[in-house]
Image: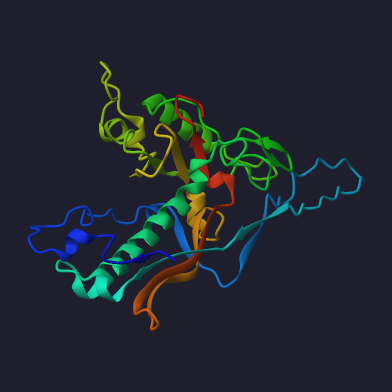
């Protein structure tokens, strides 16, 4: 166990420093709650049955012939397993007592809390980082989140958008594709775009496209259909996306609030505790929490791999 003692920060025990820099930058507010539903879990894992399909089309019945029977399928199961996370520091009694510039214990308490918040951001964004990764992103249905071949009872379905940078045409094509979303039996369902999730690199162009009453960067006088119909109501920019030209269109399936969409599961809330080791007078400060992030139903999120197609 590494203990923070006076030898690690010797300048903070000498008089004459004007200020300390590097740990007081303004911190980002939480971003993942803008597009993740937060739910509390009381179990080691949450289990879902997905791709459960209802009944098919009615069958034409010739005169005097019996009605055909159909049965719903049960689909496959997927689990969201809660994981534990923690971090700790140990501070010597002398390091706490002799520091001339700050309360070391209080500072470490704040830093541990901030570390936990940052960790939660990475956990929440993890499903998006591997959304089109054919190795690390494979889910219970055997394909990544963004795929042209999600298996269903009536064949393969796609939630993969065109591999292209953000543009008016790309967004219009995405809106059209989402309007044809189908359930497991192949019936078209009432699904609409809810928000675009993207990196800050795509933010300015996206806001120009969606903000203009006329077609962006065109010589015509045509209206901007995306804006006039409010086809993409929200834009969320997140700097945590690794692939900068990937973007995601979350659908209204997210609104069902049943855990099928982007969900952040809080199993045990963040705890920051302080203790002491009487034998050497060191202060022990630790944080701990349990959580998980999931996207169970691929229909809640359409994925574009951007121009690089990866």
Residue occupying the point 56% across, 44% down: 299
Residue 50 seen anywhere in this rendered image of the structure = yes
Residue 191 seen anywhere in this rendered image of the structure = no
Residue occupying the point 30% across, 67% down: 5
**Where on the picture, by quarter, is residue 87?**
bottom left
Q: Nearer the viewer, residue 59 or 84?
A: 84
For residue 238, side relative to residue 191 (left or right): left
Q: Nearer the viewer, residue 272 or 65?
A: 272
Residue 39 position (above or below residue 178): below
Residue 116 position (above or below residue 156): below
Q: Position of residue 240 (x, y in %)?
A: 38, 45
Q: Position of residue 294 (x, y in %)?
A: 54, 54
Q: Which image quadrant: the N terminus?
A: bottom left
Q: Position of residue 47 (x, y in %)?
A: 65, 61
Residue 271 position (above or below residue 208): below
For residue 62, side relative to residue 243 (left or right): right
Q: Position of residue 70 (x, y in %)?
A: 82, 50
Residue occupying the point 28% across, 60% down: 8
Q: Nearer the viewer, residue 100 or 217?
A: 100
| Numbered-mark total | 0
Residue sitting at the far top: 219
Residue 227 position (above or below residue 104): above
Q: Nearer the viewer, residue 230 or 298?
A: 298
Residue sitting at the far bottom: 278
């Amino acid at each position: 166990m590494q203990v923070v003692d006076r030898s690690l920060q010797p300048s903070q025990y000498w008089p004459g420093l004007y200020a300390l820099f590097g740990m007081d930058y303004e911190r980002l507010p939480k971003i993942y709650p803008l597009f993740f539903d937060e739910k509390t879990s009381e179990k080691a894992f949450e289990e879902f049955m997905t791709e459960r399909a209802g009944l098919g089309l009615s069958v034409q019945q010739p005169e005097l012939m019996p009605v055909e029977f159909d049965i719903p399928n049960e689909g496959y199961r997927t689990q969201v397993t809660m994981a534990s996370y923690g971090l700790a520091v140990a501070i010597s009694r002398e390091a706490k007592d002799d520091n001339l510039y700050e309360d070391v214990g209080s500072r470490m308490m704040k830093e541990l809390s901030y570390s936990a918040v940052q960790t939660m951001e990475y956990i929440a964004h993890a499903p998006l980082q591997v959304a089109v990764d054919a190795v690390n992103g494979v889910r219970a249905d055997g394909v990544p989140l963004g795929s042209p071949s999600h298996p269903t009872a009536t064949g393969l379905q796609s939630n993969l958008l065109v591999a292209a940078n953000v543009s008016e045409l790309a967004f219009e094509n995405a809106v059209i594709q989402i309007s044809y979303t189908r359930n497991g039996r192949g019936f078209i369902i009432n699904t609409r775009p809810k928000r675009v999730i993207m990196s800050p690199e795509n933010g300015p162009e996206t806001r120009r496209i969606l903000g203009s009453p006329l077609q962006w960067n065109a010589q015509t006088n045509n209206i901007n259909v995306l804006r006039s119909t409010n086809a993409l109501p929200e834009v969320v920019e997140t700097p945590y996306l690794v692939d900068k030209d990937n973007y995601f269109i979350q659908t209204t399936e997210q609104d069902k609030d049943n855990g099928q969409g982007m969900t952040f599961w809080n199993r045990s809330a963040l705890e920051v505790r302080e203790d002491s080791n009487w034998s050497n007078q060191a202060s022990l400060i630790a944080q701990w929490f349990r959580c998980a992030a999931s996207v169970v139903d691929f229909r809640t999120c359409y994925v574009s791999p951007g121009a690089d197609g990866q």
